[in-house]
Amino acid sequence: MSGFLKAVMRLCILIAVGGCSNMPERQPAELLPQLPQEWHAAPELHAFSDQNWVESFGDPVLNALIDHALSHNYNLKSAAARVDAAIAQARIDSSGLWPQVSFAPAYQYTQIRSAGFGSAQFSVFEAMFALSWELDVWGRIRATRAAALEDAEAAGADYNAARLSLAARVAQHYFALLEARLQTQVAEQSVIDRSNIASVTQGRFEQGLVRGLDVRLALTDLANAQSQLAQTKNQAQQIARQLEVLLGQYPADDWQKTAGTIPELSGSPSFPVQQALPDPPELLPAGLPSDLLARRPDLIAAFSRLLAADARLDSARKLMLPRITLTGTGGTRDTALVDLVDPRSAVWNLFAGIMHPLFTGGRIRGGIQLNEARVEEALSRYQDVALNAFREVEQALAAEEWLREQEKALREAVEQTEASHELALYYYRLGFIQILTLLDSYRSNLNAQSAHLSVQRQLLHNRINLYLALGGSI
């Protein structure tokens, strides 16, 4: 009989080893279409400088805001908690590799009463141990552990991506608030200019030099300027409250209160400190497209989740193989507590068994198909994330050139309209032009200044998007 059992064991091992499937060896670049050797939008940029892009702006206020947000933002704290949870789950999934031992001490008191014979009492003390251990011969549990470790790696990459995203959003809101305050100043000056025009028009009307229609048009233009001023103030307070939430502060639109919680800014008298939007720092080299696969946290996370799906599929397939388990119980039982430590009273029982699934109603096959579908989902997801990452870099590199051309043209427009609206007022006083021409020159100047501030902010936002797309460090 023993020879028969050995033969059966050898047969099971041969079948199992023959049917055992390994996880595929995946390389990130091999999962994508052929990558170009350089970025199409900026072929002259090669080596990527992984310097702190926040410091490249040279703004201590921005540095302080981002540092504070990284320590107090609640979404980032949630991401950190997810990393801890993934690590704990990996520890749980790894526990099956080790024997599971439990200790169950017990005390039993029994009293027996019998008619005519009185009663009897006795006590029994127990110290029992139990052991169970599945021998991971085929690597099923190791595959489950590998999947959990890849999930933890993905969670860590998600956390890094969240840090980068938070820093980018704080920087963009900071520059947006700076622009909104400057737009408010432009709108306030526009109201002053429109008030002067209305006064000049009223004076000329009283002198009989213009019609009442001119006064109506000037007052209408003044009302529109006041409406635009209210709109810019509303935009400024909305952006300020969004920035405060990113900093983990109550959205009160109160810079003095917010700055008081940041040691580096507690002495700052006002915000923003700058009187103009800064120029973007010098453009950093973008590196090679293939380098992006190992640098961007979201790509690292997507690839780790693909490897986790591969490992779970491998584990699901190995459920078809026999499972070898060891179980054991042992301990002592005695009426005297002191006798429990006597090794002569110990009793042990050890059992080794093999369980091979014969019929499970399609549960195992269904689990394999489910995990195969999840592998395909993870693969497609990785490819989609990668292509979008390349698009973001190419798009930001291309936008840099067009935004600079737009900023140059709008700067020229501001200079021209500033000169023209002063001449228009002079000519209107002399009666050489109509009121509509005067008002149009002032509107053109206001629109040019507003558009110029907007494109300056877009340049800064685009630069931040480029750093974020490249996976730059902070």
Image: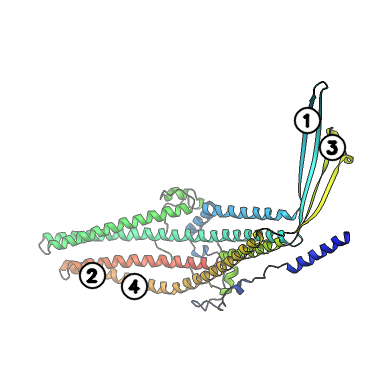
Which numbered disc flags the more N-terminal residue, 3 or 2? 3
Which numbered disc flags the more N-terminal residue, 2 or 1? 1
For the residues carrying marks 2 and 1, which lies nearer the camera in this image? 1
Q: Amino acid at mark 1?
A: Tyr
User: Seen in the image, is 158 located left or right of residue 361?
Assistant: left
Q: Which residue bears the numbered disc 3?
A: 340
Residue at mark 4 to residue at mark 3: CA–CA distance: 96 Å
Q: Quadrant of residue 198?
A: bottom left
Q: Amino acid at mark 2?
A: Leu
Residue at mark 3 to residue at mark 1: CA–CA distance: 16 Å
Residue at mark 1 to residue at mark 4: CA–CA distance: 98 Å
Residue 371 x, y percent position in the rendering: 62, 63
For the residues carrying marks 3 and 2, which lies nearer the camera in this image? 3
Q: Residue at x 38, y 72 (%)?
A: 406
Q: Quadrant of residue 154?
A: bottom right
Q: Residue at x 46, y 49 (%)?
A: 258
Which residue is situated farthest in the left direction here?
208
Disc sitting over residue 109 in the figure: 1
For mark 2, give the secondary structure.
helix
Quadrant (top left, top right, bottom left, bottom right) of the N terminus: bottom right
Which numbered disc flags the more N-terminal residue, 2 or 4? 4
Q: Which residue bears the numbered disc 2?
A: 423
**Mark 1: few/some/many CA within 10 Å (<14, 14-19, 20+):** few
For the residues carrying marks 2 and 4, which lies nearer the camera in this image? 4
